[in-house]
Amino acid sequence: MKILTFTGNTPSQALKKAKLEIGDEGMLIETKEVRKKAFGKDALYEIVIGIEEDMIPSTYKKTSQPLSKQKPLKQESQDVLFDLSNAAEQIAKVSRVVDDPIAEYMTPPRQALPQVAPALEPKELKEIKSEINKLTDKVKIIQNMFWDEKFPDIESQIPAEFAEIYRLASQSGMNKKHLDELMKITLEHMPFKMRENSVTVKRYFQTILRKMVPIRREPTLGVGIKKVIMLVGPTGVGKTTSIAKLAARYSFLLQKKYKVGLVVLDTYRIGAVEQLMQYARMMKLGIETVVDPPEFSSALDSLRYCDYILIDTMGSSPYDKGKIEKIHECLDANNTAFEVEVVLVMPSSIKYEDLQVTYDNFATLGVDSLMFTKLDETMGFGNIFSLSYETKKPISYFSVGQEVPEDLVCASSDFLVECLLNGFNRSKA
């Protein structure tokens, strides 16, 4: 029979460790307390398991040292921390970094936890808690600093304090050129005092992001003011559903109930026309269909009693120049006094490069603002930020689901930055 030992902060923890290592075949022989719980130290228990040698799983890793020479869990973790510190120092040398950004937080292993007197004053307890919080934060920084991204214009690595925020933004799908520009701005203008922990770094970065996202506020129409909005974009992005959401919003949800009319250019898709007509019947809205460009002005003129006129267009591939040109002909045929605001609708679930191609091909229509749909179907939002930042076009609305009219929200930089750094949260929309 083979005798094996396992340790843990509680007997159940040690037993769980044993089951993970050797399964249920062993027999519990003894449980004993190796170290009592004390201030700054957890208790340590040891269990002894007996098992036949032929029953030991092949995956079981034998301890390289006898139990008497094994280090308690906290001491082993402490050694790992200082190994990481040494690794960080080596990385700094390779990257020609003059100062180790975490050096001031590192202390010799044997002095990591000074002896504390039995009786402590509240002030001393507060100081100890503060030091522990700082150490925890620095461990987090160390975990995020092992990456090889560099600024294109700066020889040294980005400081470790910024590693986490850089990783989050990079994984969100943000264009690298835009991210490097933002990091450069942050490094140039951020007060050095704010670099003490990752929380203040993240907060400052959020502020920079919010200021760089153009947002179009929803207007309040004055007496006699009319607004005509045309939604354009690729097939399948949810233009028709978005039209219905906007119609319901302007008709019922705002403080003032506006008169809304609908115009349909999407006669290629019978289903889309029927869907919008059904919404129009439910909300008692006027609706006009346009087959040829010359009919466009007549449709607008027949809805001149409305405060808002919403235009649904045929969906088209960004590469289908013919359908985009058809929309262009309608706009050119407009001889009314109405000025048409063109809103490009795109899904948030495609990568930045595809968003850029889509924008470039629809830009000939004179895009005034952007609307993004399917925010509930993606994990990355940096692509939205990058397109808005690159094109300087403001974002007007976000569609966060399929429900009409609930899942449409006015765009805000706070919400976009929250999604970019922490993921989509419907409750914060």
Image (cartoon, rainbow, N blue to C red):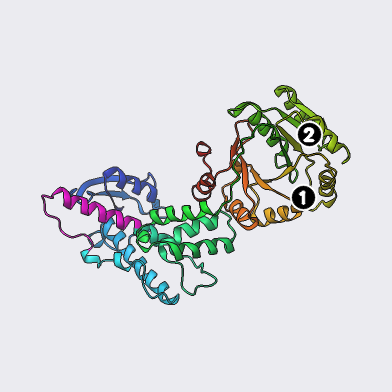
Tag 2 secondary structure: strand
Tag 1 secondary structure: helix
- Of the pair 276 and 97, the residue shown nearer to us: 276
Left or right for 360, reference 56:
right
Q: Dominant secondary structure of the magenta stretch?
A: helix
Q: Position of residue 211 (x, y in %)?
A: 52, 53
Please, what is the three-letter code of the amino acid marked with disc 2?
Val
Asked whether residue 429 is drawn in magenta, I would say no
Q: Which numbered marker is on residue 365?
A: 1
Residue depicted at 57% across the width and 61% down the height: 178
| Residue annotated with mark 2 | 263
Q: Position of residue 201 (x, y in %)?
A: 41, 57
- The residue segment tinted magenta is 112-137
Q: Position of residue 29 (x, y in %)?
A: 25, 46
Circle 1 Cα neighbour tier, 10 Å, few/some/many (<14 / 14–19 / ≥20): some
* Residue 392 versus residue 279 in the image, above or below: below
Left or right for 417, reference 18:
right
Give the CA distance from mark 1 to mark 2: 17 Å
Asked whether residue 131 appears in the rendered view, the answer is: yes
Asked whether residue 404 appears in the rendered view, the answer is: no
Please, what is the three-letter code of the amino acid marked with disc 1?
Leu
Left or right for 119, reference 14:
left
Residue depicted at 49% across the width and 63% down the height: 185
- Of the pair 302 and 320, the residue shown nearer to us: 302
